[in-house]
Image: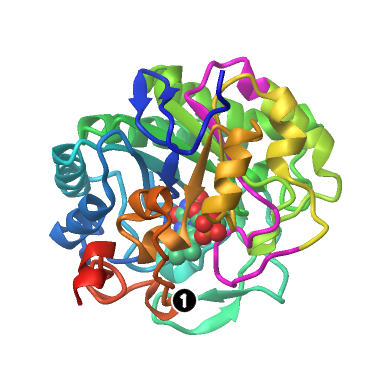
Amino acid sequence: MNPPSLFSPLQIGPYQLKHRVVMAPLTRMRAARPSLAPRPLNAEYYAQRATPGGLLIAEASPVVATGFGNPGVPGVYTDAQVAGWREVVDAVHARGGLIFLQLWHVGRVSHSSFQPGGALPVAPSAVAIAPEFKAMTADGKVVDYETPRALETSEIPVMIESYRQGAKNALAAGFDGVEIHGANGYLIEQFLQSKSNIRTDQYGGSIENRVRFLIEVTEAVIGVWGANRVGVRLSPYGIANGSGEADPMPLYSHAITSLDKLGLAYLHFIEPRASGTGRADVDWKNVPSAMMLYRPLWSGVLISAGNFNGASAQSAVAEGHADAIAFGRFFISNPDLPRRLQRGYPLTPYNRATFYGGEERGYTDYPVHDELARA
Ligand SMILES: Cc1cc2nc3c(=O)[nH]c(=O)nc-3n(C[C@H](O)[C@H](O)[C@H](O)COP(=O)(O)O)c2cc1C
């Protein structure tokens, strides 16, 4: 049997992908304001990147109003947001594509200026992100992170309920599935890691306890979608937003083996060599490979992301290190990325200045290859 290729089909849950070039979740901060609902420009952007049988993972979307740390990010907790997302989903489906939504809560990676009533951000523990990282306020000032307010034990079921409601809203919007954002130093990762979780209740202390929130959120979301339409994203060895576990192996081994029992659609890694949030173009050397380390613990579909190009993606799939590869930055600047990779067309470089916020420039105005050739 031939080894799999980036362009051979892949079964993910009930869906048969026609290729394995996945669009990674990408925060672009271009939702309508003040509703924070997706708008026609967002639908156009996703539709441009849809391919028949190709999987897009829509940008991280807070499941509740306390889950924001950036302006212009779309939510998934109001009727207007669900209606906006439905337009996005319909546009992607019209092109034969599949689209999952990434469910988000930023936890302490926020500022009181984004919080309802100007309250402090909430987190597992009252531990601020170190001052070498800076927060941006809602009016654009760069400041130190505040010390968040630790969630009471009694508030944790309420937070899990927010994820369940976000999952229900995503279902109502017509998505094909959801991905739980457990990466990049946000709320779920804050629970996982000992640096940000010093709780003394059943959600802190031992590895089992720190993994509990991730598992309970995942089970709640599975209750809405069924396991085979739910993915989870993790970034072991990542350092985004002040995260980082001194010894990730025991923690992530336990998290991944626990998730593996749930029969999820997929597990999605951000490789440690890439900066988790893509804020800088780093390519760390001499760091572990998440897909290679943890693949033996995962029996399902594995997606990996982080500094891949066509050749490295192809070899990761052919060698069985991952089943599919998610592309972030190159999917921003190449709406027809799968086709370009398949045909070996050159890739358009991305413009970092237009990643976050703005209108169509750097968003819907990147050409497809044929347009370039004609120009
Ligand atoms: C502009 C931008 C926004 C991002 N937003 C998200 C996000 O919403 N959720 C997430 O899990 N990762 C996010 N990431 C990380 C990407 O999904 C991806 O893992 C990272 O860019 C590495 O892949 P790449 O080298 O192909 O760009 C973002 C990255 C960039 C550049």
Name the residue beneath numbered marker 1: 137
Secondary structure under the numbered disc 1 in the rendered image: loop
Residue 317 horizontal/vertical position (percent)? 58, 36
Say above or below: 18 vs 126: above
Q: Residue at x 36, y 68 (%)?
A: 71
Q: Position of residue 370 (x, y in %)?
A: 23, 63
Q: Quadrant of residue 254?
A: top right
Query: Which residue appears at 83% of the width and 58% of the height?
Result: 286
Q: Is residue 91 left or right of residue 291?
A: left
Overall secondary structure of the magenta section: loop
Amino acid at pointer 1: Thr
Relative depth, front residue between 353 and 73: 353
* 281 in magenta: yes
Farthest-out residue, bottom: 141
Look at 40% across and 75% down and name the residue there. 138
Colouring style? rainbow
Q: Residue furthest right?
A: 247
Q: Position of residue 342 (x, y in %)?
A: 40, 47
Residue 7 shows in this picture: yes
At which x and y percent is residue 360? 22, 72
In-image side of 43 versus 211 (left or right): left
Residue 69 showing in the rendered view: no
The answer to which quarter of the image holds residue 243 is bottom right
The foreground one among 163 and 294 is 294
Image quarter in which the N terminus is found: top right
Q: Is residue 327 left or right of residue 321?
A: left
Q: Which residues are magenta?
A: 258-284
- Tally of numbered tags: 1
